[in-house]
Amino acid sequence: MTVQEAELDPKYQALWKKALISAERKNWEYVIDQVLPIVTANLGFMDGRKLLRSAEGEVVGSGKKFSFGLGGFKPSSKKEPAEVIAEMEENVFRKDPFSLSANEQLFDLAMKLQYPDLASFALETIRGGHPENTKNMHKLAQHYMANQQPEKAAATYNALLKVNPRDMEAMQGEKNAAASGSIKNQGWGSANFKDAMKDSGEAAKLEMLSRQGMTQEQMEQFLAETIEQYNADQGNIVIVKRMSDLYERLGQLETALMFYDYALTLNAGDVALQRKVEILRDKVQEEKITEYEREIEMNPDAPDIDDKRAQLAEIRRQRAGVVISEAKTRVDRNPTDKALRFELGQAYFSAGMYGEALPELQQAKSSPNLRIKAILMLGRCFERKNMNDLAKTSLLEASKELLIMDATKKEVLYELANVMEKMGDKPGSLEALKEIYNADYGYRDVAKRVESSYS
């Protein structure tokens, strides 16, 4: 139903070109006068309507106030919807392009006329003028989903979550939209599936292959079957989990995470699934962090480098928050598990929350299997808090308990050397470095630091 410029009557094409010239010159009143007759005659000319609304916004923004209503305009119930829209353009939108009630009515009229793009435009206009209106954004996202535009729906839900990060409906909507978009992008349709599956025995064969190990081609074929089943029954957790697993094995981790998240909404009490989601989310974020770090290192003078650094910092912040929250939940469920205590302490340490990490690591220290790791991290926490004497005590304790010069003891001694140097104890620092030097000449910068002390 959308009309392109080439489809316009020649007289409207000429008028459109004049409007574009007026827009370049920022003659917004002229733009409005030139575009109004075009969109009145061509309801589906969306490029024109977008330019018209933009020009009206420029004019209104120059000092006129918004009324957020119909401004006294009362559409006649006897007129056709297209006629009502034309009157609204002239009598309402020209004065108040972001009118809430007028755009809601435009949406209703567009849907009656079966112009979904015009209906989207009406809600997008409200969004532009009322960016905090979450009710409208929900309506817009649902409209996009109903009209097979999951990518736009996901983007709308994502924007909604920036306004209200705790909107559970938006969280679920974003996941469902992203999952639908992924299926759409795969290009697996019913016809494709039927062509791929010659008979019912093929499905059983693929089921068997899924257990025994599959090639990439076989996994893709099996995924086609699973997507077909999902489309028929989206609430079947067995199918959702199978599809999640296949996406993960195919290396499409973000898509896999979307479906694992969805599976968790179907069975929130599945502890194993909760842990799977946590691990996979961390892996996805780690991949993004690595990607941003590589891009920043390779092109530090790129025009968008500040944006990338900000995005990297935000991913790290979100990751730390999620990891801490999940670790705390596990500790709350089983407070006597020292391994979980260590994980929580490690999460706090990674987030720079050294004071919060201390009690968790002190708890973990009582576990024989975790003792040295916990003491090492305790020493690091004390050092970060500039409590260097306590850091030295912890690291000396760990060093004495480690009888073999393995990777862990080297790490402990290296941290100890740094702390002692920071405290001004250069002889003590050098002794710790020499222990490493005698066992591993190539460890970090130990050789350089030891040898330079003799010159």
Image: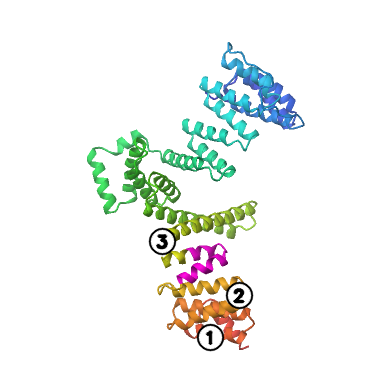
In the rendering, at what x and y percent does residue 220 appear? 35, 45
The C terminus lies in quadrant: bottom right
Q: Is residue 65 magenta?
A: no
Residue bearing mark 3 = 334
Q: Nearer the viewer, mark 3 or mark 1?
A: 3
By secondary structure, the bulk of the magenta-drawn segment is best described as helix
Structural distance between the alpha carbons of marks 3 and 1? 43 Å
Structural distance between the alpha carbons of marks 2 and 1? 24 Å
Neighbourhood count class around disc 1 (C-alpha, 10 Å): few under 14, some 14–19, many 20 upward: many
Query: In what element is the residue under mark 1?
Result: helix
Q: Nearer the viewer, mark 3 or mark 2?
A: 3
**In the image shown, does 143 or 76 lie closer to the viewer?**
76
The residue drawn where x is 50% and y is 76% is 411
The residue lying furthest to the left in this view is 201
Residue bearing mark 2 = 387
The answer, for residue 418, to whether it is visible in the render is no
Q: Nearer the viewer, mark 2 or mark 1?
A: 2
Question: In this picture, which residue range is highlighted in magenta?
Answer: 344-364
- Identify which amino acid the numbered label 3 is placed on: Asn
